[in-house]
Image (spheres, rainbow, N blue to C red):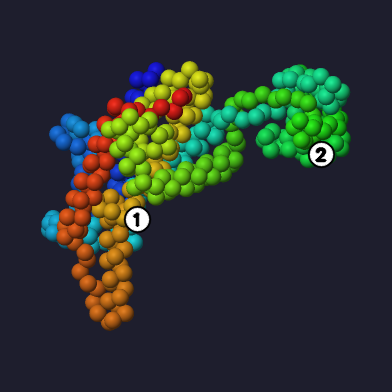
């Protein structure tokens, strides 16, 4: 099962990469830019086919993918008659759409995965099905029985027992009318919650079960949007704290310090955690699937944000260059001068290589840490 979880993670990661690149591809084609290659992986070509002007295929090293859009810099040579289709010659707004489409695909995938959890898989929730009735309680006096399902309180339909049950503690001992379902029939019971000093609140005297709850379509959309926003905020916090986490990671990698589950985790570590989630004996099948989907959603949101950082060679770095070009053009217009030549990213190669080197070192340290001192979530 653990191997199955790791394999599922690898497949999900590759699909995420494909969607990222497809975001670039579909928007570039929409703006009539020339796209000549769309490959999953790097290195030696294993298989490919050509459709129109684009070659699609798979390469030997499954460590990412790319979409080749021609004319990314002014030095790139375009075929005669197709100079207008160069990326470099597009308007700033179109450049930003194409560059940002990859990250948008990650956010969209994260949202859809959260939707699949709420709408399809279901989440653990406190349900209104009665599993215990306390002796000598208000519920016992009113005639509640194990197996009853509470449908409404004072005519208000129960949609979320965790929230709706608060009407009991807020009753201040006043009699409430409960609509219940018992053996397929609806019954009405009246009970006045009693004050329990040890709990410091009014209680009915029932225990309800914890089970899997699937939300309606509209509710699932709303909950997925909230969950995606929460994951985005947490990812932003993680990115801001990233520089402070590196020294800790080095100590955990080359010292005896235990890995922090809230610290930095690489692809190998994430795959291992996915394997642990899928093979965990502490979770049922629904919880395993939900946990796995949540991990993939979280990863996509984080990657989508990370890719927007204004650092070359990330898409965010290219977006920053495009925005800088537009700012320069704006000030040129104010001075009545023609639009200046666009910034050639080739000139920024030293910066690009420096960032790439830092990311490569960090990736290597994460790889070593994930192998020698893996993260454990005790799933």
Up the image or down, 352 lies above or below 336; here it is above
Front position in the image: 113 or 307: 307
Q: Which residue in the protein does label 1 denote?
A: 97
Viewer can see residue 31: no
Image position, residue 318 (x, y; %):
27, 56
Residue shown at 28% from the left, 50% from the top: 314
Up the image or down, 87 lies above or below 377; here it is below
Image position, residue 238 (x, y; %):
41, 45
Image position, residue 242 (x, y; %):
36, 46
Q: Which residue in the protein does label 2 denote?
A: 171
Circle 2 — which element?
Answer: loop
Front position in the image: 377 or 298: 377
Viewer can see residue 233: yes
Residue shown at 53% from the left, 31% from the top: 120
Side of 173 where 162 appears, left or right: left
Q: Quadrant of the N terminus?
A: top left
Residue 256 sits in quarter: top left
Q: Earlier in the sequence, mark 2 or mark 1?
A: 1
Residue shown at 30% from the left, 59% from the top: 320
Image position, residue 185 (x, y; %):
79, 22
Side of 189 where 81 appears, left or right: left
Q: Residues within 10 Å of mark 1 (few under 14, many from 20)?
A: some
Q: Residues within 10 Å of mark 2 (few under 14, many from 20)?
A: some
Circle 1 — which element?
Answer: helix
């Amino acid at each position: 099962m653990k191997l199955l979880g790791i394999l599922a993670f690898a497949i999900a990661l590759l699909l995420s990469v494909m969607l990222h690149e497809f975001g670039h591809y579909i928007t570039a084609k929409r703006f009539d830019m020339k796209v000549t290659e769309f490959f999953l992986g790097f290195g030696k070509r294993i298989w490919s086919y050509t459709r129109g002007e684009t070659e699609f295929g798979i390469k030997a090293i499954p460590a990412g993918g790319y979409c080749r859009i021609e004319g990314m810099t002014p030095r790139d040579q375009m075929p005669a008659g197709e100079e207008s289709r160069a990326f470099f010659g597009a308007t700033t707004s179109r450049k930003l759409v194409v560059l940002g489409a990859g990250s948008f695909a990650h956010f969209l995938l994260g949202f859809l995965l959260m939707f699949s959890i709420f709408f399809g898989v279901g989440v653990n929730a406190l349900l209104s099905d009665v599993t215990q009735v306390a002796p000598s309680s208000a519920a016992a006096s009113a005639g509640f029985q194990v197996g009853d399902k509470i449908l409404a309180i004072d005519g208000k339909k129960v949609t979320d027992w965790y929230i709706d049950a608060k009407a009991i503690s807020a009753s201040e001992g006043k009699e409430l009318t409960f609509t219940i379902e018992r053996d397929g029939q609806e019954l009405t019971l009246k009970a006045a919650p009693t004050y329990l000093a040890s709990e410091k609140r009014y209680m009915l005297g029932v225990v309800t079960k914890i089970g899997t709850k699937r939300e309606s379509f509209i509710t699932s959309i709303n909950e997925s949007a909230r969950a995606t926003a929460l994951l985005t905020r947490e990812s932003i916090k993680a990115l801001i704290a990233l520089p402070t986490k590196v020294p800790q990671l080095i100590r955990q990698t080359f010292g005896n310090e235990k890995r922090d589950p809230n610290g930095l985790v690489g692809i190998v570590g994430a795959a291992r955690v996915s394997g642990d989630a899928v093979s965990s004996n502490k979770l049922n099948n629904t919880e395993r699937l939900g946990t796995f989907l949540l991990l993939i959603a979280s990863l996509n949101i984080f990657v989508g944000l990370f890719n927007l950082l204004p650092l070359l060679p990330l898409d965010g770095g290219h977006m920053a260059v495009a925005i800088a070009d537009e700012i320069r053009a704006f000030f040129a217009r104010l001075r009545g001068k023609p639009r200046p030549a666009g910034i050639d990213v080739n000139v920024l190669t030293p910066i690009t290589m420096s960032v790439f080197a830092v990311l490569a070192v960090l990736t290597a340290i994460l790889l070593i840490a994930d192998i020698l001192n893996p993260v454990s979530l005790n799933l």
